[in-house]
Amino acid sequence: MKDDTPSAGTPRTVPVQSETWSNQVNAEIRRAAATGIYDIRGGGAKRKVPHFDDLLFLGASISRYPLEGYREKCETSVTLGTRFAKKPIELKIPVTIAGMSFGALSGPAKEALGRGATLAGTSTTTGDGGMTPEERGHSDKLVYQYLPSRYGMNPDDLRRADAIEIVVGQGAKPGGGGMLLGQKISDRVAEMRNLPKGIDQRSACRHPDWTGPDDLEIKILELREITAWEKPIYIKVGGARPYFDTTLAVKAGADVVVLDGMQGGTAATQDVFIEHVGQPILACIREAVRALEDLDMHREVQLIVSGGIRHGADVAKCMALGADAVAIGTGALIALGDNDPRWEGDYQKLGTTAGAYDDWHEGNDPAGITTQNPDLMARLDPLEGGRRLNNYLKVMTLEAQTIARACGKNHLHNLEPEDLCALTMEAAAMTHIPLAGTDWYPGKPGSTF
Amino acid sequence: MQTYDLEADGLRGLNASLHAQAQDTNQTAWEIVNPKGSHAIAVGLDAPIEVSVKGSTGYYCAGMNKQATIHVFGSAGPGVAENMMSGTVIVEGDASQCAGATGNGGTLIIKGNASSRCGISMKGIDIIVHGSIGHMSAFMAQSGNLVVCGDAGEALGDSLYEARLFVRGSVKSLGADCVEKEMRPEHLTLLAELLDRGGCDAKPEDFKRYGSARQLYNFNIDNAY
């Protein structure tokens, strides 16, 4: 039948979704309005931020001499803790496993991390909640985190560790403490933390017995005295004020500075914290290196960077920007099986999908990693997990070596800023790497921009 | 009696000597002279020895102690007996902030007053203070006992877990989730033992008991402001 309405045939405005009031934003407003509680989740920042993809390696050319891809040596080893420690840590590869707690992760997951790291010749790290015997037993090199909560902290484990990492902050939540919700507080987790089973455990946001860098210097003295000056002492900071934090960490006596950008994960915190506090790791590295150079401490105090490091290219870019090593967390969990599509059916039941699952705090992880549920934990075979992690670490290292050889470098540490160009103005400004096709970056001395 | 002159012979030698003592050492009595406020004195000990410090100490004296008895004949700086696991630490004078912080066990006796954050995050230690304590004491205290014969400052027991707090004098204010609780017979018995252990001339009946209301144990948005 013919449409006789006056508007028939008149072009209409296509419905336009707002960039500001996107479906995601609106859905979150509706969720907040319905529940009255902010969103808590695990992981790191999901928003798009300037990252290592905004840098490229130039490779060799007439003016640069490459190394043969498979024949010529490209060293990957790194020694951490050479400043004061009597027993620095020597690693075969510059990719370490970041601190993740038993409690946030299952026992088998921690064991798998230890196994994989050991096979690859690198270190793994404890987390809030202390050191488990399995973790110590399966980790050739184990870094012991010294956290504000001091859950499970004791001098015996301090001495059993290969290094001590004083956690001041982490990239996902600089200025924030931790939380482990009651669903994950099993008998064992509760006992290790000396708290009742089933309660939501809060971890303090600052240390209980020191408040500033002068105090921290004395705290480090105490730790060194207790451990006979043998252990390297790391200080971990979130990506907040990397120049000043690095300067103060060095002043306080750190052997190693660990710098974690906002893409670095957490077991659980508020989404608004993860997405709106802290800087991307890309913006932090050169500032930290500048601090070390200003103190004439670059390479004497080693720099480990973390937050969104996925593959060997990211590793190589960190090295080129001046880091001595990197730490991975999320990538390691994915290697173990986190967010694997094989569990898609279970993810759907939880109202999510593989790749997006981040309710790690609820303890229902289909992959059996971020859980204390025995049935789910059994899904992760620590031997197989360790093998997969080792493979992943090996591939990352091979990829980084491939790039380093292409740049004519016989050690990953020989990569340098000059090997890079930036694809965006933002990346150029943050890293002081020239914009591709130019010899210029924003803020370059002599530049009018 | 072994005498160690800290000023002359240095901190490293002191702690190394004390760490070298075996469980069955016959060098059980040590005297440290000239501490002069030095930091990290007698830290990380793990033997049943008795250490007398003849003077005042700086930060973290007796930190992470196990088994040893450490007696400070003076005042102690911040973090005395922090994270103690077992043993006994006695301070004849006053203690600065964070006394007994995160302690897991053992007994800390302070004959004078203790400053702010006494017993912060305590995890099983018993702290007995003859005098008064400062603000934010027993913040996030998890377990153990804090006995205060004098007064307590502001925000006592903020975000408290299962630690028991006994105060004889006034409490300027209680922190979030800390409430006064009934003093039952078992608490009087416990307190009597603690007072006796601490050498306090005080009656259990004169004290009030404070503990967690347990309203912050599980996340509730109404507690977030």
Image (cartoon, grey):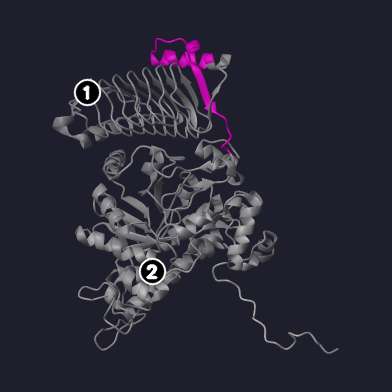
Residue name at image x 39 percent, y 31 percent: B117
Q: Is residue A406 visible?
A: yes
Residue B7 in picture, x, y percent from top left: 15, 31
Position above or below: B204 against B9: above
Which quarter of the picture shows residue A394?
bottom left
Stretch in magenta: B188-217
Mark 2 highlights which residue? A315
A194 part of magenta stretch: no
Q: Which mark is residue B55?
A: 1
Task: Please give the chain letter of the residue carrying mark 1.
Answer: B
Which quarter of the picture shows residue A68?
bottom left
Label 1, residues with CA under 10 Å away: few <14, some 14-19, many ≥20? many
Residue name at image x 50 percent, y 35 percent: B159
Q: Where does the N terminus of chain B fall, quadrant-wise?
A: top left
Label 1 to label 2: alpha-carbon separation: 53 Å
Q: Is residue B220 visible?
A: no
Residue B211 in picture, x, y percent from top left: 53, 26
Q: Which residue type does callout 1 highlight?
A: Gly
SS of the residue at dot 1?
Answer: loop
Question: Of residues A332 and A252, which is closer to you in this image?
Answer: A252
B206 part of magenta stretch: yes
